[in-house]
Amino acid sequence: MSQIRDIELAPSGAHKIEWVRRNCPLLRSLYEDFSNTKPFEGKKIALSIHLEAKTAYLCKVLAAGGAEMFITGSNPLSTQDDVAAALVADGLNVYAWHGATDEEYNAHISEVLSHQANIIIDDGGDLVHMLHTTKKDQLQYVIGGCEETTTGIIRLKAMDKNNQLEFPMVLVNNADCKHLFDNRYGTGQSVWDGINRTTNLIVAGKIAVVAGYGWCGKGVAMRAKALGARVIVTEIDPVKAIEAVMDGFEVMPMKEAARYGDFFITVTGCAGVIDEEDFMEMKEGAILCNAGHFDVEIDMKRLREIAVSKEEMRNNIIGYKLPNGTNIYVLAEGRLVNLAAGDGHPAEIMDMSFAIQALSAKYLVEHESELKEKIIDVPREVDMEVARRKLKFLGKEIDELTTYQTEYLNSSSL
Ligand code: NAD
Ligand code: SAH
């Protein structure tokens, strides 16, 4: 009953998943634990996350814990058809293919939500949105869910504020072991991996404009500098702007930065960050990409309207000739460059993010009767458990407080 491109691709996908398995010790340890304890026995999980090999291994860990899995991607361009095929060959239910149209993408989400799922694992809010609109009949089966990314959490908080959220959601992104590593080091490395493999151009000596200096922006700017770029940061938050200045970057509005950049990377979660006025200021050959959310950070709609002509230069590079004669190039249609034009974050990073996901899902089923709040932080003990296991796998030891030190830190006297 799955809906995928081609089951014959399964052997290639299985190799990719095995590579991930070998590089994800945390998830491997959870696979073992869950195989013995079966925390999800009798439960159904609906999952929408970028469908590539690391997500596939998360799905296998959850299935090892007894869950019946219903899986789709979270971006039509990040789904890898061989990985989807490998999951189906393993008996999991998958509804996704690379390059799905908007209608197909929504139909796949709808399909995932047609099986009375108890746990929702979401990445940007697509599943939660549909459950609260066209799939309300499925709400009765839901215990709760987990949200993977910053933008999804912004949406959830808005829904909660308006009393619209019908079930509890764990804010996975806000765990220390998620955003401190995934958003910063994961996005930092995988964005430049996506840009480099797609363009095959030099970064050293060029100017990279990074829009947004949150967790992702910090990582992207840090790695741009390490590759030899001069970095300009654009921000709307004065505190983040000071941080960028003190980290050694130029800070200015996009309207000004537009004329300097060789590479533009948006990581804000906001819309219209690079607009028509900015396009018209850009220099010949400027390269634009997004690693924030969906395809709205660069105003692609307007760019397509004003372009005199467009040309596919290489896979994932479209050149747009502007009315003033300048050619600018957009990677991966303005969708997440690290996933649509790469394999996303490295395995060791997703090992931590997905360990938080798996343990948060387990927390939901174990605390089903006590879940009062609609917005739940990842319990501190889950964060600490993931950190402790990761440190052990990194072969690092740390100090422990002595009794004297504990008393000293808890003492109210000077
Ligand atoms: P964040 O909240 O830490 O940072 C976002 C920053 O952008 C903030 O500092 C904010 O002030 C700034 N900003 C907002 N609007 C702006 C604008 N118009 N111009 C300039 N700056 C602006 O969030 P984050 O964790 O860094 O995530 C950013 C986005 O990336 C989110 O959409 C998130 O879902 C997504 N994300 C993508 C990946 C990936 O793999 N590509 C990984 C993690 C998060
Ligand atoms: N629907 C949204 C999803 C936001 S993606 C969109 O595509 O615009 C942002 C999330 O992708 C991050 O929080 C990060 O944890 C996740 N991610 C990054 N690399 C990944 C990978 N290799 N596999 C699965 N998820 C990944």
Image (cartoon, helix red, strand yellow):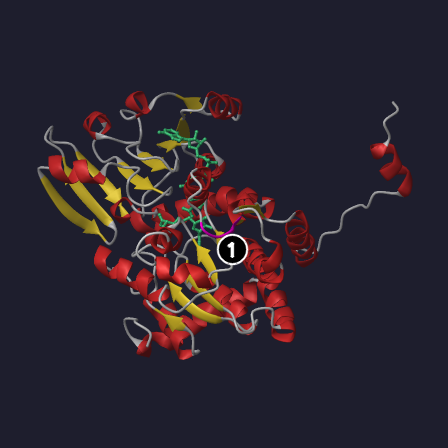
Of residues 239 and 337, the one nearer the viewer is 239
Q: Residue at x 45, y 70 (%)?
A: 69
Of residues 405 and 129, the one nearer the viewer is 129
Residue 156 position in % (x across, y down) = 44, 44
> Is 31 displayed left or right of 254 in the figure?
right
Q: Which residue is drawn at 44% across and 78% down?
A: 90
Which residue does the numbered mark 1 point to in the structure image?
Answer: 350
Residues in magenta?
166-170
Relative to residue 388, is residue 110 depicted above or below?
below
> Is 351 displayed left or right of 315 in the figure?
right
Relative to residue 20, is residue 410 depicted above or below?
above
> Is 276 displayed left or right of 220 in the figure?
left
Magenta-colored segment: predominant secondary structure = loop
Of residues 293 and 255, the one nearer the viewer is 293
In which quadrant is the C terminus drawn? top right
The answer to whether residue 73 is seen in the rendering is no
Amino acid residing under circle 1: Met
